[in-house]
Image (tube, rainbow, N blue to C red):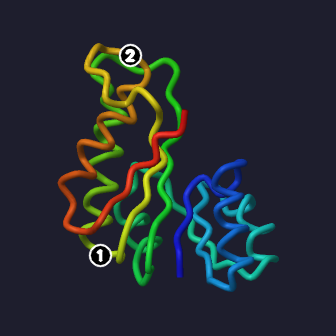
């Protein structure tokens, strides 16, 4: 079983479709149960969870061979990115509790830049993921 965040969008949807086409099982992680219905119709398990809700994420990540993780963009963050930090804490706790075999994080080109900018969301998430006890791959799409 592979858990996929961002499944209702183009990238997460493509990841889930590829997994299904390969004969693998998928757990669709959605923020709204209604948005999971099309994926349930494709034989996916559905878990309702937001990135900031550790308990729901733990349930969504549990029993998985891997997680495809995306974070939603925040084009108007508060100074210091408190929402990103809170989400990172919840995601880390969920990964540590659920112990998936691996995690793939869709980051972004430029996530390594140290100057404050909108890419810092991905940079901060990458930094957190470097501290988890399971293997993580970062995809920095350009």
The C terminus sits in image quarter: top right
**Label 1, label 2: how far apart the Cα atoms are:** 32 Å
Instruction: Check residue 117 in the rendering and tell me which mark sits there, or answer none.
Output: 2
Instruction: Check residue 99 in the rendering and tell me which mark sits there, or answer none.
Output: 1
Which SS class for mark 2?
Answer: loop
Task: Check disc 1: other Cα within 10 Å, few if <14, some if 14-19, many if 20+.
Answer: many
Q: Position of residue 31 (x, y in %)?
A: 59, 54
Residue that extends furthest to the front in the rendered view of this protein: 142
Q: Earlier in the sequence, mark 1 or mark 2?
A: 1
The residue positioned 29% from the left and 36% from the top of the image is 124
Taking the image as shown, residue 136 lies to the left or right of residue 38, namely left
Residue 29 picture quarter: bottom right
Q: Position of residue 35 (x, y in %)?
A: 73, 58
Taking the image as shown, residue 85 lies to the left or right of residue 133, namely right
Q: Nearer the viewer, residue 113 or 48?
A: 113
Q: Position of residue 26 (x, y in %)?
A: 61, 76
Using the image, determine if residue 63 lies above or below residue 141: below
């Amino acid at each position: 079983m592979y858990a996929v965040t961002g499944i209702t969008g183009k990238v997460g949807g493509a990841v889930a479709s590829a997994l299904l086409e390969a004969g693998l099982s998928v757990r669709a992680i959605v923020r709204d149960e209604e948005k999971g219905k099309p994926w349930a119709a494709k034989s996916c398990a559905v878990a309702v969870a937001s990135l900031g809700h550790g308990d729901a994420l733990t349930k969504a990540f549990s029993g998985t061979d891997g997680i495809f993780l995306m974070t939603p963009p925040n084009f108007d963050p508060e100074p210091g990115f408190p929402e990103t930090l809170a989400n990172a804490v919840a995601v880390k706790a969920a990964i540590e509790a659920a112990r998936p075999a691996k995690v793939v994080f869709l980051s972004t080109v430029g996530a390594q830049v140290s100057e404050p900018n909108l890419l810092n969301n991905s940079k901060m998430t990458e930094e957190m993921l470097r501290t988890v006890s399971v293997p993580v791959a970062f995809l920095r799409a350009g």
